[in-house]
Image (tube, rainbow, N blue to C red):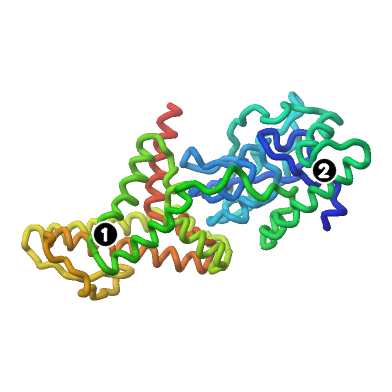
């Protein structure tokens, strides 16, 4: 359907907290139970209608969601579906909490969180809502001129939204504004640090010790109340995958298969990962105790031993250098796995089974359960 043939009920150009007040929105996002709370959906939503701040699952803010489908298109796990919006509650005539199951890989439910008070103009009803909302989208209008001007403004904004969602069959709802919030912040450039980290390891293996930041900070933030904020904002590797797979179009764009997002695979991979990490620590201990000599080798994918003889480790304790070789092996292996799944599926498919993401999500779940008692 072209933008010129859309009725005002099919197009929503309203931004702010009361995004769907007075406008008929046919679809709403619904999150399945397999959500890994990676936060990709929250970044994709231009209206802030979905949040993974809790760290255990994404939640849809029903009265902000306009059904554009960008969250579903971005979700690396493919666990967000667009479902028919439930009928308004007879008590208040407003949007209701979406509890219908998401059409997807397994039984699921939509999650909603309370919303803040309307940011622009409060609540509206009847024709007053239409006249109040339309100026917010395209200035002050009256009569038939208002309708034609609104449709023209909506059509021009609908084209970029449609282009970004052309591969998403679920995005049959209204168009969204193309951006939310101000320009980029400092943490949006942390992908440079990730790329620099991998590069410096080729010249000085001791830079591998800096990778401990990517291990300790996510756990500390999750334990002390920050949820999965590291995954959502500060993960430079995730940003790097988004850049390569999204902007450079190196990703196939398919959602991750069901087995990759399954609980048994994610926790099985976490157990395997931690076992190999413990083995690396044991090797470091053997070098520290003098039971074995240091080996200048980087092990890729826990199998392929790559000689790393060109780097100098003079003046460094052998055990410290051994730990650096082992830790760099872990970081390089996880990056290669992320690049493979990025190419085969959606850009940040690594987030679906990332061991740190799995651990921090479980911490958030445990804290959430404890808070309910």
Residue positioned 45% across, 56% down in the render: 238
- Helix, strand or loop at label 2? It is helix
Residue 121 sits in quarter: top right
Q: Is residue 18 left or right of residue 248?
A: right
List x then y, in percent, for residue 283: 17, 61
The x and y percentages for residue 351 are: 46, 55
Circle 1 is placed at which residue position? Answer: 207
Quarter occupied by the N terminus: bottom right
Say if 308 sits above or below 82 in the image: below
How far from the left and from the top, in percent, is residue 214? 34, 51
Instruction: Name which residue lies at 52% across and 68% down.
Output: 344
Q: Residue furthest left?
A: 290
Residue 265 showing in the rendered view: no
Task: Tell which tag, 2 or 1, sits nearer the viewer.
Answer: 1
Q: Residue at x 69, y 39 (%)?
A: 15
Q: Is residue 372 left or right of residue 112?
A: left
Residue at the spot 86% in from the left edge and 37% down from the top edge: 141
The foreground one among 372 and 354 is 354
- Residue 176 place in picture, x, y as percent: 70, 47
Foreground of the two, 169 or 310: 310
Give yes or no for contact between labels 2 and 1 (Cβ–Cβ under 8 Å): no
**Please, what secondary structure does the residue beneath circle 1 have?**
helix
Residue at far right of view: 144
Disc 1: CA contacts within 10 A as few (<14), some (14-19) or many (>=20): some
What's the CA distance linking mark 2 and mark 1? 56 Å
Say which quarter of the image contains residue 363.
top left
Numbered disc total: 2
Q: Say whether disc 2 or disc 1 marks the residue closer to the N-terminus.
A: 2
Residue at image mark 2: 9
The quarter in which the C terminus is drawn is: top left
Q: Nearer the viewer, residue 322 or 289?
A: 322
């Amino acid at each position: 359907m072209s933008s010129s043939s859309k009725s005002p009920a099919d197009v929503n150009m309203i931004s702010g907290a009361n995004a769907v007040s007075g406008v008929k929105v046919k679809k709403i996002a619904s999150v399945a139970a397999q959500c890994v709370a990676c936060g990709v959906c929250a970044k994709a939503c231009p209206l802030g209608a979905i949040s993974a701040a809790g760290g255990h699952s994404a939640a849809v803010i029903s009265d902000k969601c306009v059904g554009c489908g960008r969250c579903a298109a971005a979700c690396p796990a493919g666990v967000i579906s667009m479902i028919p919006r439930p009928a308004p509650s007879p008590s208040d005539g407003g949007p209701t909490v979406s509890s219908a199951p998401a059409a997807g890989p397994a039984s699921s439910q939509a999650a909603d969180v309370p919303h803040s008070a309307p940011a622009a103009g409060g609540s509206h009803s009847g024709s007053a809502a239409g006249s109040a909302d339309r100026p917010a989208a395209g200035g002050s209008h009256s009569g038939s001129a208002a309708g034609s001007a609104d449709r023209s403004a909506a059509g021009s904004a609908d084209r970029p939204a449609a282009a970004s969602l052309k591969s998403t069959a679920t995005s049959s709802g209204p168009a969204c504004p193309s951006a939310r919030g101000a320009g980029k912040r400092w943490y949006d450039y942390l992908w440079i640090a990730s790329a620099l980290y991998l590069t410096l390891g080729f010249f000085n293996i001791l830079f591998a010790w800096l990778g401990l930041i990517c291990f300790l900070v996510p756990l500390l933030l999750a334990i002390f109340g920050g949820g999965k904020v590291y995954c959502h904002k500060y993960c430079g590797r995730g940003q790097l995958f988004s850049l390569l797979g999204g902007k450079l179009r190196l990703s196939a764009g398919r959602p991750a298969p069901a087995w990759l997002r399954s609980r048994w695979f994610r926790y099985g991979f976490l157990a395997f990962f931690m076992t190999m990490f413990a083995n690396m620590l044991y090797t470091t201990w053997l070098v520290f105790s003098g039971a074995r000599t240091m080996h200048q080798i980087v092990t890729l994918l826990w199998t392929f031993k790559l000689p790393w003889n060109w780097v100098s480790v003079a003046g460094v304790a052998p055990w410290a250098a051994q730990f650096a070789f082992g830790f760099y092996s872990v970081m390089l292996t996880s990056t290669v796995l992320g690049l493979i799944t990025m190419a085969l599926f959606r850009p940040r498919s690594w987030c679906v089974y990332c061991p740190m993401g799995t651990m921090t999500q479980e911490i958030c779940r445990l804290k959430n359960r404890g808070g309910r008692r």
